[in-house]
């Protein structure tokens, strides 16, 4: 098992907490209950002190003492998820990711509305390039939190990631220069068939996120990226290509304007003097 464990966000919007709320301990004897609490508390302390393998050992013991504890499964899942390294497709690393997913799923089985479990699963699915699985979990989260813009944004990232990956692979095979449009290549049409629904969905999801948070500059930045995706699959249509590139540029301007506004010092207006 890898020894370098750290609790990190796998993507900015997919972060999950390092320490979950301790739920009620159930179905254990008083002695086992006391030992369970000790293991969970010592695991938490070890985790905070960066004694990661020791922390995992305590969490595994806690799970063994009370397999019906959602909190214990969440602690263990989160610790294991911190050990998974995105993009390293070796057997040991993939096994760590899968075991972490299994623990999150066990917590979700115990509480089908556990947002912490769903967010952990979605985060790992994304990191492990299980994009459709991650999207389905995000949609479940939206059902429970329809007013949270973060997960519309998360789906937008998922859609863009898949579209961008396929497009760049094709551009690489064709040997296109970065500034050279794909729209004149005959291969553009197959890519359009693969990606146009993803791009449309991504733009729609980001639009929902921006309806809920009008100054959501991260969502604006991905709007720019998705319009550039759409531009490159406007096969044989230079007018639509240029229109999408222009729209993408407007989203860049909007993003920079919002970031500038957020970074500007806030002016404090002094209250008027009391009338005499």
Image (spheres, rainbow, N blue to C red):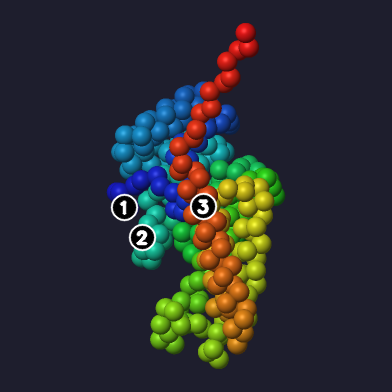
Dot 1 or dot 2, earlier in sequence: 1
Dot 3 or dot 1, earlier in sequence: 1
Q: Residue furthest top?
A: 276
Identify the residue position indicated by label 1 in the image: 2
Q: Is residue 161 left or right of residue 139?
A: left
Q: Are marks 3 and 1 in contact (CB under 8 Å)?
A: no
Identify the residue position indicated by label 3 in the image: 257
Q: Quadrant of residue 226?
A: bottom right
Q: Nearer the viewer, residue 191 or 117?
A: 191
- Residue drawn at x 55%, y 67% is 248
Q: CA distance from mark 3 to mark 2?
A: 45 Å
Q: CA distance from mark 3 to mark 1?
A: 43 Å
- Nearer to us of marks 3 and 1 is 3
Question: Is residue 13 visible from the viewing direction of this image?
Answer: no
**Mark 1 neighbour class, 10 Å CA radius: few under 14, some 14 to 19, many 20 or more:** few
Image height check: is 95 above or below 184?
above
Dot 3 or dot 2, earlier in sequence: 2
Image height check: is 270 above or below 189?
above
Q: Position of residue 206 (x, y in %)?
A: 62, 58
Q: Are marks 1 and 2 in contact (CB under 8 Å)?
A: yes
Q: Position of residue 158 (x, y in %)?
A: 55, 62
**Mark 3 neighbour class, 10 Å CA radius: few under 14, some 14 to 19, many 20 or more:** some
Q: CA distance from mark 1 to mark 2?
A: 8 Å
Q: Nearer the viewer, residue 178 or 32?
A: 178
- Residue drawn at x 57%, y 29% is 24
Question: Is residue 208 visible from the viewing direction of this image?
Answer: yes
> Residue 65 has which mark?
none
Q: Nearer the viewer, residue 236 or 41?
A: 236
Identify the residue position indicated by label 2 in the image: 92
- Residue drawn at x 60%, y 52% is 151
- Residue drawn at x 56%, y 31% is 23
Q: Secondary structure at mark 3?
A: helix
């Amino acid at each position: 098992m890898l020894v370098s464990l750290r609790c990190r966000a796998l993507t900015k919007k997919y972060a999950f907490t390092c320490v979950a709320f301790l739920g009620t301990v159930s179905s254990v004897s008083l002695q086992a209950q006391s030992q369970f609490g000790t293991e969970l508390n010592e695991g938490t302390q070890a985790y905070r002190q960066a004694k990661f393998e020791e922390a995992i050992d305590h969490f595994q013991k806690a799970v063994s003492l009370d397999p019906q504890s959602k909190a214990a499964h969440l602690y263990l899942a989160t610790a294991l998820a911190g050990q998974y390294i995105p993009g390293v497709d070796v057997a040991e690393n993939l096994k760590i990711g899968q075991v972490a997913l299994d623990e999150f799923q066990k917590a979700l089985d115990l509480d089908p509305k556990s947002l912490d479990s769903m967010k952990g699963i979605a985060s790992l699915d994304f990191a492990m390039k299980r994009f459709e699985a991650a999207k389905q979990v995000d949609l479940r989260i939206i059902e429970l939190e329809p007013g949270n813009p973060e997960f519309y944004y998360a789906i937008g990232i998922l859609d863009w990631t898949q579209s961008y990956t396929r497009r760049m692979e094709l551009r690489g095979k064709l040997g296109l220069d970065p500034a050279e449009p794909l729209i004149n290549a005959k291969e553009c049409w197959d890519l359009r068939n693969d990606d146009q629904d993803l791009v449309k969905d991504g733009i729609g999801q980001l639009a929902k996120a921006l309806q809920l948070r009008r100054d959501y500059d991260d969502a604006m930045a991905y709007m720019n990226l998705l319009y550039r995706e759409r531009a490159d699959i406007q096969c044989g249509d230079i007018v639509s290509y240029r229109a999408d590139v222009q729209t993408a540029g407007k989203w860049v301007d909007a993003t920079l304007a919002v970031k500038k506004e957020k970074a500007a010092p806030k002016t404090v207006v002094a209250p008027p003097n009391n009338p005499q």
